[in-house]
Amino acid sequence: MNSFDVEILTPAGRVFAGAVESLVLPGSEGSFGVLAGHVPLLAQLSSGRIMVRQGDQEHYFNCGPGLANVATKHVTVLVDSAEEHT
């Protein structure tokens, strides 16, 4: 499966960075998924849960509102707060 780079950033610093296979974000109009090669977009995020899949592992983050910038091979998530949950 193809991978792409993801960064989750808060005002306090970087919460996550790495290559992932998929990403699910809490969009303001509902959750949406991102896979490698996704069309570029800028999306408003609501408070909710982010899911990041790296191989067989899934990482979950509770996050505050923010923005996601989806580019061809990189996604930058800018949120007010984010905390990892297992």
Image (tube, helix red, strand yellow):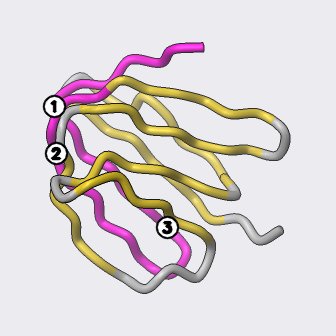
Query: Up-down: is 22 above or below 14?
Result: below
Identify the element where label 2 is drawn: strand
As measured in the structure, the alpha-carbon distance from the residue carrying label 2 to the one carrying label 1 is 6 Å
As measured in the structure, the alpha-carbon distance from the residue carrying label 2 to the one carrying label 3 is 17 Å
Identify the element where label 3 is drawn: strand
* Disc on res. 25: none
Identify the element where label 1 is drawn: loop
Name the residue carrying label 2: 66
Question: In screen coordinates, is 84 left or right of 37?
Answer: left
- Snapshot quadrant of residue 3: bottom right
**Residue type at the position of mark 3:** His
Which residue corresponds to the image point at 62% horizontal and 46% vertical from the top-left? 18
Picture coordinates of residue 40, whole percent (x, y): 37, 82
Question: Tag 1: Cα neighbours inside 10 Å, few (<14), some, or many (≥20)?
Answer: some
Q: Earlier in the sequence, mark 2 or mark 1?
A: 2
* Disc on res. 80: 1
**Residue type at the position of mark 1:** Asp
In the foreground, 76 or 13: 76
Picture coordinates of residue 21, whole percent (x, y): 70, 58
Asked if marks 2 and 1 touch (Cβ < 8 Å), the reply is: yes
Name the residue carrying label 3: 74
As measured in the structure, the alpha-carbon distance from the residue carrying label 1 to the one carrying label 3 is 20 Å
Q: Earlier in the sequence, mark 1 or mark 3?
A: 3
Question: Tag 2: Cα neighbours inside 10 Å, few (<14), some, or many (≥20)?
Answer: many
Q: Is residue 53 magenta?
A: no
Q: Is residue 85 magenta?
A: yes
Write the start and end of the magenta stretch as one range: 63-86
Question: Tag 3: Cα neighbours inside 10 Å, few (<14), some, or many (≥20)?
Answer: many
